């Protein structure tokens, strides 16, 4: 099987649509001998921040000398980014070999009922579980894809469960209230295992504590440990006030697990100043020395975080940036566009290559009345015609790309590679 055939097979699974629930993955992992039970796991859920917390935990434990597994989603450019050992992405040839191993098992499960065939995300989850077992990792950090209770990753039995934040997003799948979404996230809490919470709304805290009490779990809240003053929180290499909360969340988890997985304070400090997580206020210097910032922003809470970052950027540079943006879902556009308009000197609208992408008309409709700065329609190929090159902006302009993580991925592909991977087609439908 070539990698091209592997991509085609996986695309066929993705094209069947999302299948929300964990019955199929339970059957799948059972048929595979439960590889997810072969190593300790940290399980992380949250509306925002879960990827950054996972990256910080991975960096801390790798810095302490442990072999780490990291499963996250979606990918930016290459599918193998989702499955990493010691931050090395799974290469195409390895993905092909795992698909060859798993395909007969999956097809056997789907023989009697096609609906029992594992979905694309379940397939990738199973590959991650197997790769971590084959690699003999000391610890795996597993990020949920969507929600928690019914997410494919929720077959793990973690050492600790982490809920980074809770806000309104994916309401169609998770519910339209903070309490309902909190209940879905709380689904990763396992009996008797400690729980870490970041800064959560009070309504969400009540739900998490109720579920934890019911399951005999102790909850460790970041605010209770670090207080309300963000200036006293750790400052990681990732920028933004919310990243200080994420760093505190990761540190609290490490503290709670200290007896099982000892880590020195020097290892924590060293890891946090080196941690990398692409697309989160990521600074890149382009041709002519211009600064480009990539920042995924996909919901109302993310828009508040973006506002703080843009405000700080304007203070630091003395001028408003050119903002390039596009997103998925009208509600996300409505949360994001007023923030962008307040801080942008010019806005360039793009449509991500995804089925649910907002049209130019929908993006325009979210712009507040009275906004007088230029609003242009862009084309990714024209804006980023070659690696390290952006055709927009003057020499002293700062360019901020924000919105959908899928848009960030499309732009990263043009900025960093000479050839297109075509793996945007292998993104999750949600």
Image (tube, helix red, strand yellow):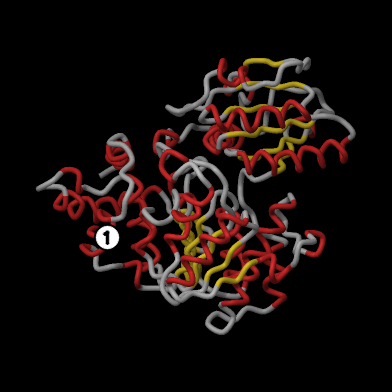
Image side of residue 290 versus residue 8, left or right: right
Q: Quadrant of residue 119?
A: top left
Name of the residue lying farthest toward the bottom: 259
Name of the residue lying farthest toward the right: 318
In the rendered image, the vertical position of residue 287 relative to residue 10, given as above or below: above
Residue 28 appears in the rendering: yes
Q: Where does the image place residue 159, in percent across and percent down from the top left?
A: 47, 74
Image side of residue 54 versus residue 268, left or right: left
- Residue at x 79%, y 34% (from the top left corner): 289
Q: Where does the image place residue 384, in percent across and percent down from the top left?
A: 62, 26
In the rendered image, the vertical position of residue 380 relative to residue 206, given as above or below: above
Helix, strand or loop for disc 1: helix
Q: Residues within 10 Å of mark 1 (few under 14, many from 20)?
A: some
Q: Quadrant of the C terminus?
A: top left
Image side of residue 54 versus residue 112, left or right: right
Along the viewing direction, whichever of 71 and 182 lies nearer the viewer: 182
Q: Quadrant of the N terminus?
A: top left
- Residue at x 39%, y 56% (from the top left corner): 149
In the rendered image, the vertical position of residue 92 relative to residue 377, given as above or below: below
Residue for badge 1: 26
Q: Where does the image place residue 264, in percent across and percent down from the top left?
A: 67, 79
Image side of residue 354 versus residue 334, left or right: left
């Amino acid at each position: 099987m070539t990698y091209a055939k592997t991509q085609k097979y996986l695309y066929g699974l993705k094209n069947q649509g999302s299948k929300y629930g964990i019955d199929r993955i339970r059957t799948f992992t059972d048929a595979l001998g439960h590889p997810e039970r072969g190593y300790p796991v940290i399980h992380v859920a949250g509306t925002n921040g879960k990827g950054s917390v996972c990256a910080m935990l991975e960096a801390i434990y790798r810095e302490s000398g442990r072999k780490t597994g990291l499963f996250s989603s979606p990918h930016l450019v290459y599918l193998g980014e989702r499955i990493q050992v010691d931050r090395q992405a799974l290469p195409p040839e390895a993905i092909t070999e795992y698909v060859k191993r798993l395909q007969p098992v999956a097809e056997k499960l789907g023989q009697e009922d096609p609906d029992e065939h594992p979905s694309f995300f379940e397939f990738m989850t199973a590959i991650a579980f197997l790769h971590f077992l084959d690699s003999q990792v000391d610890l795996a950090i597993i990020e949920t894809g969507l929600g928690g209770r019914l997410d494919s990753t929720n077959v793990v039995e973690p050492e600790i469960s982490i809920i980074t934040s809770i806000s309104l997003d994916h309401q169609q799948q998770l519910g339209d209230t903070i309490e309902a979404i909190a209940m879905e996230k709380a689904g990763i809490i396992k009996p008797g295992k400690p729980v870490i919470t970041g800064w959560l709304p009070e309504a969400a805290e009540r739900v998490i504590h109720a579920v934890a009490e019911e399951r005999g779990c102790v909850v460790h809240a970041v605010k209770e440990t670090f207080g309300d003053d963000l200036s006293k929180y750790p400052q990681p290499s990732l920028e933004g006030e919310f990243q200080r909360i994420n760093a505190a969340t990761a540190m609290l988890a490490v503290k709670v697990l200290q007896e099982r997985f000892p880590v020195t304070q020097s290892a924590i400090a060293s890891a946090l100043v080196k941690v990398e997580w692409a697309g989160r206020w990521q600074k890149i210097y382009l041709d002519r020395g211009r600064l480009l910032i990539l920042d995924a922003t996909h919901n109302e809470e993310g828009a508040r975080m973006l506002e703080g970052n843009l405000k700080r950027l304007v203070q630091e540079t003395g001028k408003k940036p050119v903002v390039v943006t596009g997103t998925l879902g009208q509600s996300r556009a409505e949360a994001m566009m007023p923030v962008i308009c307040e801080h942008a000197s010019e806005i360039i609208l793009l449509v991500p290559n995804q089925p649910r992408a907002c049209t130019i008309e929908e993006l325009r409709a979210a712009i507040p009345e009275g906004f007088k700065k230029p609003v242009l329609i862009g084309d990714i190929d024209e804006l980023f015609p070659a690696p390290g090159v952006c055709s927009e902006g003057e020499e002293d302009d700062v360019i901020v790309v924000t919105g959908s993580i899928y848009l960030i991925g499309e732009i990263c592909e043009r900025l960093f590679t000479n050839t297109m991977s075509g793996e945007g087609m292998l993104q999750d439908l949600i």
